[in-house]
Image (cartoon, rainbow, N blue to C red):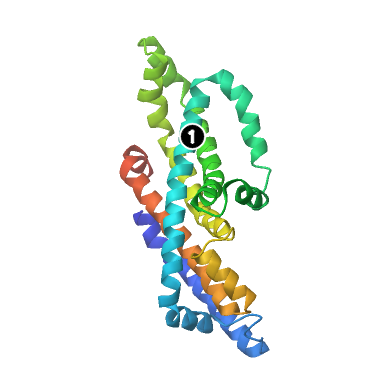
Amino acid sequence: MDRIAKKGWRPAAVLLLLLCIWEVAVNILDIPGWLLPAPTVIASEASQGFQELLPHLQSTAMLAVGGFIIGCSVGILTAVILHLLPGVQESVYPLLILSQNVPTIVLAPLLVIWFGFGLLPKLIVITLVCFFPVTVAAMDGFRNVPPDMRHYMLMAGASKIQMFTKLEWPYALSSVFSGLKISATYSVMGAVISEWLGAKNGVGVYMTLASSSFRTERVFVAIFIIMILSLLFFAMISAAEAALVKWRRRKVE
């Protein structure tokens, strides 16, 4: 984490440079605000309309967190079941891969037909987005346990459950957190997509209303809010990983 903090100025400097180029290009080329607003216009809109945006931000954040927790719980449970039951894995895992070839935005109208416009279809959308990265990462972590450590546990007379709880699960934690970090960013995207199904509040609703009224600066405000939320969720999972997977932190240092 210290190393990331020390080098954090580099991406910040690149981002600042890109924003400056954007601002200068919009002014020099005299691009209409409805087509591409300048960063200063976007910042001004975010500042002036923050009170209006705040309920949407809170709604999206709560929805993303709830869907993330459910999706990752389902993902970890699925990975554990498939790992401990090889016969089930051979039957189900190819179907899980096929399920990811169906775009979530295509399933959204079906979920509305089946479950209505309430909270349930929104949570299902986020769960579908979040569970697969965690499942794949966890299963890879279970499989990548060093053979010599596995052989040592077998020589010590460990059962399959003991092998999992004492060796495979602790060793896979690093991979699990990799999947959690991916899902953390996907959860915000899934929340915004789910809000297009008919929510009353949310960044997705805010973006839709802004787009329909050609308030392009508000669309960009929503985009930046989504990016910031995703980065915050990613940072929270990274902090949890640094606190829990201490052996990896010592190895990196």
In this view of the protein, which residue sits in the foreground, 248 or 230?
A: 230
Q: Is residue 91 above or below residue 154?
A: below
Q: Residue at x 46, y 26 (%)?
A: 145
Q: Residue at x 41, y 36 (%)?
A: 173
Residue 253: x, y in percent?
35, 46
Residue 12 appears in the picture as rendered: yes
Q: Residue at x 55, y 54 (%)?
A: 190
Q: Is residue 144 above or below residue 176?
A: above
Q: Residues within 10 Å of mark 1 (few under 14, many from 20)?
A: many
Q: Is residue 6 left or right of residue 90?
A: left
Q: Is residue 114 above or below residue 216?
A: above
In the image, what residue type sits under mark 1? Ala
In this view of the protein, which residue sits in the foreground, 118 or 36?
A: 118
In this view of the protein, which residue sits in the foreground, 133 or 110?
A: 110
Number of labels in the image equals: 1
Residue 80: x, y in percent?
47, 28
Q: Secondary structure at mark 1?
A: helix
Q: Label 1, on which residue?
A: 138
Residue 63: x, y in percent?
45, 55
Residue 8 appears in the picture as rendered: no
Residue 16: x, y in percent?
49, 75
